[in-house]
Image (spheres, rainbow, N blue to C red):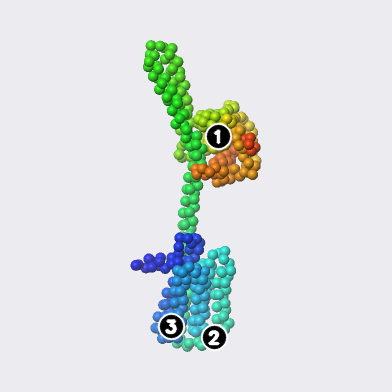
Amino acid sequence: MNIKKIWHKISYLGLTPAIANSLAQRIVLTNQIAFCVSLIAGFYIFVYLFFGISALILPEIIITLCFISCLFLNKWGFFHLAKFATLLFINGGVFYFASFLGPQIDVKMIYYASVWLPLILFDPQKKCSIITGIALALIGFMSVHFLNYTLIPVIPIPLFYQKIFYFLIILTTFTLNIIGFFIFFSSIQKSEQKLRKAYNDLKQSKLLEERLAHHVGYATLTRGIAHELKNPMAMLQSRAEIVLKNLDDPQAIKTFADIIIRNMQRLKKLIHSMLEYSSEELSQKKESFSLNIMLEDLIALSEHSCKKKHLRLISRIQHTKAVYGNRIFIYHALLNILVNAIQYTPEEGSITLSLTESDYKDKNGLSHSGVEIVIEDTGIGIPSDILPRIFDPYFTTKSQPENTGLGLSLTFRVIAENNGHIDVHSVQGKGSSFKIYLPFKKKEEEKRVSSKNF
């Protein structure tokens, strides 16, 4: 087993998958600090042996064992106790050896390294624990200073050895600081990496959820498109067979050719509507486009779902100028509202789509000239206590697993990002009315686009 594996095994003593990440990080730090300090304490056993100071060897062995016991406290699950024990043994050990060696060595210098340990070992929210840990170091330092090394008889040490000891104490203090800072900043770096990874995962997850929310309405309506395609295709086949049987009758050929052409046009329109707005990559590009064509495509796509529930789909679409915005996003936003209307309108009900030109104000209070799209249904309506929350992210009253609660939230955001506005009016038991406002292209935008093209 190499050194890296030993370090890893000791660092993760006592950790289980159930332990929260913030606590796990501090358990690792406690293990690492206790292990490093036990190694330093063990080193001093050999120093005392070398200099013949036998009176300090046994206390140093006890201190070393105490730090090793902190590792076992973590292993047995006494995490908070392990932290306090680590601080207590460091501060107690410094106090004992400072008293023994006296001002000639100045061991109390190590307190400068131990005073910031509580900031690393304890959660920032546990202020009492942090203050207690810092107080231990300050009390130890002040006790040594004011007792003036009189608590325990000071061991006389030759001047040459004093200089070596003093150098070792400075080195120990410096080493403890370096170890502490290294462990602290490496843990911060690891935390940042984990946070960055978690953020990227969350961002990717949200993008996938948004894409799902954009396409869930489209999938809902296209689920029955196979039947919608099947009927005209069967009609085409039967009429083509009749034409083959009546090649000598020009009038019959013309009649059935007209039927074939009409069904082909219907199929073409339906397939165009499906392909036009089913792009996997949702572009951020804004452009001028016709809402008249878009609403006709929406009607063509939703006819089958309406027929299945015996709903009347009423169109009151006036011809308007082209609007300006993200065509794909706006299509899916309107589709989400239309899908909700179909889902929440009982059989034999009606859904009305209307389009007129209208002035309005956006969320920032800026006035725009544009259009008003109204999607109105005779459905169950929205309860008054739920109505203010329908645009909240992840809010949904649907139980199906594919419903993310992002549909209307994204709809609201898309319309707002395209300088539009949504008003909702609903009466429970009578139906709902969604009014969507979108702008025409402004002259400044036209100049900006033309200058880019130039």
> Regarding mark 3 in the picture, which secondary structure is present there?
helix
Task: Name the foreground residue: 106 vs 278.
Answer: 278
Residue bearing mark 1: 342
The type of residue carrying mark 3 is: Ile
**As rendered, which of 16 and 192 lies closer to the eye?**
16
Q: What residue is drawn where x is 48% and y is 87%?
A: 155
Q: CA separation, marks 2 and 3?
A: 19 Å
Q: Nearer the viewer, residue 161 or 66?
A: 66
Against 61, residue 413 (above or below) is: above
Q: Which of the two labelled residues, at mark 2 and mark 1, occupies the earlier sequence position?
A: 2
Seen at 56% across and 32% down, the residue is 347
Taking the spot 50% from the left edge, 44% from the top edge, the residue there is: 401
- On the question of residue 286 being in view, the answer is no
Q: Residue furthest left?
A: 1
Instruction: Name the spot of residue 336 as percent of width and height, x first.
Output: 54, 37
Judge the density around disc 1: few (<14), some (14-19), many (≥20) Cα neighbours within 10 Å: many
Question: In the rendered view, would you say 106 is above or below 228?
Answer: below
Marks 3 and 1, Cα distance to the nearest angstrom?
A: 85 Å
Mark closer to the chain start, 2 or 3: 3
Percent of width and height locating residue 378: 61, 33
Q: Amino acid at mark 1?
A: Ile
Q: Which residue is mark 2?
A: 151
Q: Quadrant of the N terminus?
A: bottom left
State the residue position of label 3. Answer: 57
- Is there CB contact under 8 Å for labels 3 and 1? no
Could you say which disc has been placed on residue 215 in the image?
Answer: none
Give percent across and percent down for residue 265. Answer: 46, 24
Secondary element at tag 1: helix
Give the secondary structure at mark 2.
loop
Residue that appears at 48% across and 58% down: 192
Measured as percent of width and height from the top left, residue 452 is found at 51, 37
